[in-house]
């Protein structure tokens, strides 16, 4: 007889209280919250800054985590294949390859594979353990569409489509034409299902205290918040869901509070929109004897609210048997025989505290150097001296009674002691974590007197711990995640899928898959190692080439061996698919239509015809030598003919050049004679013009002199005539005066 609801609730409450994780475990939550605070540069709890003193914070946790992320993401997300499933037999190779391609396709294409890996890795580096949950996501998509003024045929076609429901319908009839049109609103429903791999915040996950791994655990839980409408759509009892309390408006979990830097978790609690009301939902995965038959099984139980009320579907408790725990976990530093390991933040937080104290002390020393303390002698102090000193302004005046009354108190600089300590702490951090300056990019000054091998050795040593962390991740969390993803697809995907894998469209039927536990993480070790591996593959290819060329009797290397080497080389240099560059020797013969040719006898694709046997290499060498000698003789003969032709053409060119040179010299002489003749004519014309101009000038000057003499003579004659006329007039006046005198005397 199954457990009663009260018994199941009591069992879940006991398991939940005794588990590690979530806000109930204060020590774990405090450690992870502190790591997140240090990552965000918030050290107010451990190192509050005094008023008026430096509040600078060294960001070593952030620098170290972000320094590891690029290398780790390149390792895991640098290609399309994260993990490879190994075949269980010779006949299983193609099936294993196809399953590998499809599972990686589902993870990278149908899931946000890159983001999932990013969150998985970052949570591990920062908060001890990263968690990913793998589950089959199924549901129903609804799309609402409205069509206006549709004719009868179109309306009938729309309404008759499968999984389509008519919500609203209005028919209109045109009074003039009698034509009927339809306005219709439809809802299309489509069911979907897909395997999902979703990162889980560490504070939402918990595990039994006695567990050493998730697979061995008897209890795990995942606690999150979902809206009321989502729970109802998932089929939970509507009345029960509406009666559950609303999740707290302000988070009380210190881990969530540390991550919540912009108040994302803050909500007003009860909202006017009841459909979006958040409810605390917990999924419990517990090993229990639910049927009370002495045979315990693993069950998934969903509860709501803080009191863990068991939710119901169709009137029954939501208790579902499951095969495995759907969680994958990984930690960068494994603590043996324990589930929770150490994070990179755990290794660096004490260094961040020490460096913060050193940086603050150094800055305070600088501030004191710029604003020294002052010694004031009371005997020399003015009544305004202290007031003046309180005004810290460049160039400010300080009044004193007499000189020498104010003296600065010397401040001892501490930079010579602090900076070596900071360098020492940086070196300690690099030694602990493996994140070095050489790993981020080698200092050019360090390369001056260092050989290439020494540089390569230093880079490899710097990446050693990064490689170890990557290997731990690959063998634990990544491997478990793909194991769960493969099983989830195999158990839940009940249809044949057509997808494009390796540049070919193939049909995938997960129902025919085998249960695979044998997996190999197909991860690189950074760009440098990828290049080294490509170089090694090229060396291997050269060895295979020499074996093939050594003679037909050697059967050590087959076309398949060569194809495998070249395919791996193409993958290592970063190309996704080898098909555009090389043909698979096992590929079937293709017909003109691009499809495989079917062998009528077997009904199977016809293999390609084997290549023709190659002749003896020694004979090929001899024939090649004869052909080369003949070609060389022909080339020499042609060279001689060509040389004679060139000499003949050169002689003709020389004669033509000489003739052209003589013609040019004659033309030049004729031109110079013509220029001299033209110059003499021009000079004669110029002299004649100068003579004519000189004669004309002389004529003008003579004429001007003659005109001036005539004018002067004429003026002289006029003056003489005027003098004579003046003398006559004077004589006349005298005569008249003489005649008049006797008359006057007698009277």
Image (tube, rainbow, N blue to C red):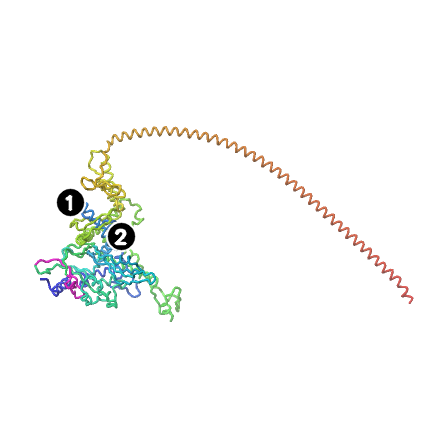
Magenta part of the chain: 294-318
Which of 69/98 is in front?
98
Residue 659 position within the rendered picture, expressed as x and y whole percent measured from the top left = 50, 31
At mark 2, the secondary structure is helix
- Quarter of the view holding residue 397: bottom left
Mark 1 crowdedness (10 Å alpha carbons): few <14, some 14-19, many ≥20: few
Residue 301 on the magenta span: yes
Left or right of 671 on screen, residue 232:
left
Q: Which residue is mark 2?
A: 70
Q: Would you say 36 lies left or right of 637 here?
A: left
- Image coords of residue 347 (percent x, y): 22, 56
| Mark in the foreground, 1 or 2 | 1
Tag on residue 89? 1
Asked whether 204 or 371 is in front, the reply is: 204
Which quarter of the rendering shows the C terminus?
bottom right
To which quarter of the image does residue 325 belong?
bottom left
Q: Nearer the viewer, residue 445 or 542?
A: 542
């Amino acid at each position: 007889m199954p457990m009663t609801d009260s018994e199941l609730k009591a069992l879940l409450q006991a398991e939940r209280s005794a588990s590690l994780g979530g806000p109930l475990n204060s020590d774990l939550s405090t450690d992870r919250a502190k790591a997140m605070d240090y990552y965000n540069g918030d050290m107010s709890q451990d190192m509050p800054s005094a008023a008026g003193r430096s509040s600078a914070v060294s960001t070593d946790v952030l620098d170290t985590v972000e320094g590891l992320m690029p290398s780790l993401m390149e390792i895991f997300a640098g290609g399309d294949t994260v993990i490879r499933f190994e075949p269980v037999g010779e006949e299983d190779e193609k099936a294993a390859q196809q399953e590998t391609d499809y599972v990686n396709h589902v993870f990278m294409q149908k899931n946000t594979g890159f983001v999932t890996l990013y969150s998985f890795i970052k949570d591990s580096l920062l908060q001890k353990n990263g968690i990913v949950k793998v589950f089959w996501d199924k549901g129903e998509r609804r799309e609402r569409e409205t069509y206006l003024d549709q004719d009868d045929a179109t309306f009938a076609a729309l309404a008759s489509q499968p999984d389509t429901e008519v919500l609203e319908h209005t028919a209109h009839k045109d009074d003039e034409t009698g034509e009927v049109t339809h306005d219709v609103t439809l809802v299309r429903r489509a069911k979907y299902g897909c395997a999902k791999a979703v990162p889980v915040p560490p504070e939402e996950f918990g595990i039994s205290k006695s567990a050493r791994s998730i697979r061995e655990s008897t209890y795990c839980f995942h606690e999150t918040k979902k809206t009321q409408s989502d729970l109802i759509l998932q089929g939970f009892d509507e009345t029960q869901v509406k009666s559950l309390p609303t999740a707290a408006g302000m988070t009380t979990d210190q881990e969530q509070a540390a991550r919540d830097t912009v108040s994302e978790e803050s909500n007003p609690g009860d909202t006017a929109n009841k459909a979006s009301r958040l409810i605390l939902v917990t999924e419990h995965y517990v090993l229990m004897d639910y049927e009370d038959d002495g045979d315990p099984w693993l069950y998934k139980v969903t509860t709501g609210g803080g009191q863990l009320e068991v939710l119901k579907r169709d009137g029954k408790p939501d208790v579902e048997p499951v095969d495995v725990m759907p969680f994958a976990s990984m930690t960068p530093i494994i603590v043996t025989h324990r589930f929770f390991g150490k994070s990179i933040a755990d290794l660096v937080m004490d260094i961040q505290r020490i460096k913060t104290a050193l940086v603050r002390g150094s800055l305070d020393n600088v501030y004191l150097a710029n604003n020294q303390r002052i010694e004031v002698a009371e005997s020399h102090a003015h009544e305004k001296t202290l007031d003046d000193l309180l005004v810290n302004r460049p160039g400010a005046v300080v009044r004193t009674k007499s000189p020498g009354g104010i003296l600065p108190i010397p401040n001892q600089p501490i930079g010579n002691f602090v900076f070596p300590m900071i360098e020492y702490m940086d070196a300690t951090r690099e030694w602990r974590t493996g994140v070095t300056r050489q790993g981020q990019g080698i200092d050019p000054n360090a390369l001056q007197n260092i050989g290439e091998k020494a540089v390569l050795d230093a880079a490899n040593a710097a990446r050693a711990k990064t490689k170890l962390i990557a290997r731990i991740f690959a063998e634990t969390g990544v491997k478990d995640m793909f194991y769960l993803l493969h099983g989830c697809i195999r158990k839940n995907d009940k249809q044949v899928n057509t997808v494009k894998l390796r540049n070919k469209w193939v049909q995938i039927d997960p129902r025919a898959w085998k249960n695979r536990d044998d997996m190999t993480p197909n991860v690189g070790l950074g760009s440098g190692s990828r290049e080294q591996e490509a170089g090694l593959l090229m060396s291997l290819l050269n060895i295979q080439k020499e074996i093939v060329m050594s003679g037909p009797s050697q059967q050590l290397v087959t076309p398949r061996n060569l194809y495998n080497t070249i395919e791996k080389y193409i993958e290592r240099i970063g190309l996704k698919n080898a098909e555009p560059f090389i043909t698979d020797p096992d590929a079937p013969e293709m017909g003109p239509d691009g499809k495989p040719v079917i062998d009528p006898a077997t009904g199977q694709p016809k293999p390609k015809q084997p290549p023709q046997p190659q002749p003896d290499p020694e004979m090929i060498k001899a024939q090649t030598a004869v052909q080369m000698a003949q070609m060389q003789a022909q080339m020499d003969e042609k060279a001689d003919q060509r040389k004679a032709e060139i000499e003949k053409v050169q002689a003709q060119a020389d004669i033509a050049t000489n003739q052209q040179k003589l013609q040019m010299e004659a033309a030049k002489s004729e031109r110079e004679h013509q220029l001299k003749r033209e110059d003499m004519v021009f000079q004669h014309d110029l002299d004649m013009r100068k003579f004519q101009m000189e004669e004309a000038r002389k004529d003008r000057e003579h004429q001007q002199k003659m005109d001036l003499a005539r004018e002067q003579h004429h003026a002289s004659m006029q003056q003489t005539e005027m003098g004579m006329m003046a003398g006559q007039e004077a004589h006349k006046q005298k005569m008249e005066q003489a005649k008049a005198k006797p008359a006057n005397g007698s009277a």
